[in-house]
Image: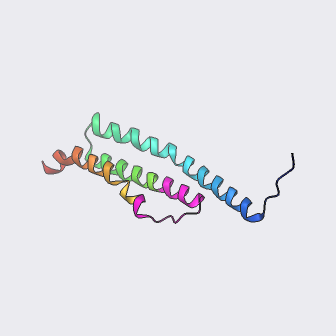
C-alpha cells in the first residue's frame, strides 16, 4: 500500500473541519446547561426573567454551534436557515410563556 501525498490545501481543510467540530462540541455542554436551567425555571418555580435569560443563552449557544460547524466545512456562516431553525423552539417557548406575559 502506498502513502497518499496530501497537498497543503487538503491539510488546511482537514484542520479547519476538526477545529470547527471541536468548537461546536465545546458548545454542547453550555447548551445542555441552558436546557436544564430553562426546564427548572419553567417547571419548578415559574421565573419569567430566568426563563428569558436561559432561553436567550440557549439560542446563542445553538446558533454558535451551527455557525462553528458551517465555518469548519467552509460554508458561509450567515445563512437564513441558521435563524429559521430557531423559529419552532421560539414559538413553543412563546406558547408556554404567553399566560405569564398576558396576565
- Residue at 82% across, 54% down: 4
Q: Residue furthest left?
A: 103
Q: Residue furthest top?
A: 44
Q: Is residue 23 magenta?
A: no
Residue 49, how many percent across, how many down?
Answer: 29, 49
Task: Name the one closer to the observer, 38 or 77.
Answer: 77
The image quadrant where one finds the N terminus is top right
Residue 77, how many percent across, how many down?
Answer: 50, 64
Residue 90, how many percent across, how many down?
Answer: 30, 51
For residue 10, side relative to residue 85 (left or right): right
Write down the region rendered in magenta.
64-82
The colour style of the image is rainbow
Task: Name the one closer to the observer, 39 or 48.
Answer: 39
For residue 58, side relative to residue 8 (left or right): left
Residue 70, how many percent across, how many down?
Answer: 53, 58
Q: Is residue 67 magenta?
A: yes
Predominant SS of the magenta segment: helix
Vertical position of residue 71 compared to residue 102: above or below: below
Task: Name the one closer to the observer, 49 or 100.
Answer: 100
- Residue at 26% across, 47% down: 48
For residue 37, side relative to residue 29 (left or right): left
Q: Residue furthest right?
A: 2
Amino acid at each position: 500500500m502506498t502513502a497518499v501525498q496530501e497537498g497543503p490545501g487538503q491539510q488546511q481543510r482537514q484542520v479547519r473541519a476538526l477545529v470547527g467540530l471541536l468548537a461546536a462540541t465545546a458548545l454542547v455542554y453550555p447548551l445542555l446547561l441552558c436546557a436544564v436551567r430553562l426546564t427548572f425555571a419553567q417547571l419548578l418555580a415559574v421565573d419569567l426573567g430566568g426563563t428569558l435569560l436561559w432561553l436567550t443563552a440557549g439560542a446563542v449557544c445553538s446558533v454558535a454551534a451551527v455557525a462553528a460547524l458551517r465555518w469548519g466545512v467552509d460554508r458561509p456562516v450567515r445563512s437564513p436557515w441558521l435563524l429559521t431553525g430557531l423559529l419552532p423552539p421560539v414559538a413553543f417557548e412563546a406558547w408556554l410563556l404567553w399566560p405569564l406575559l398576558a396576565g
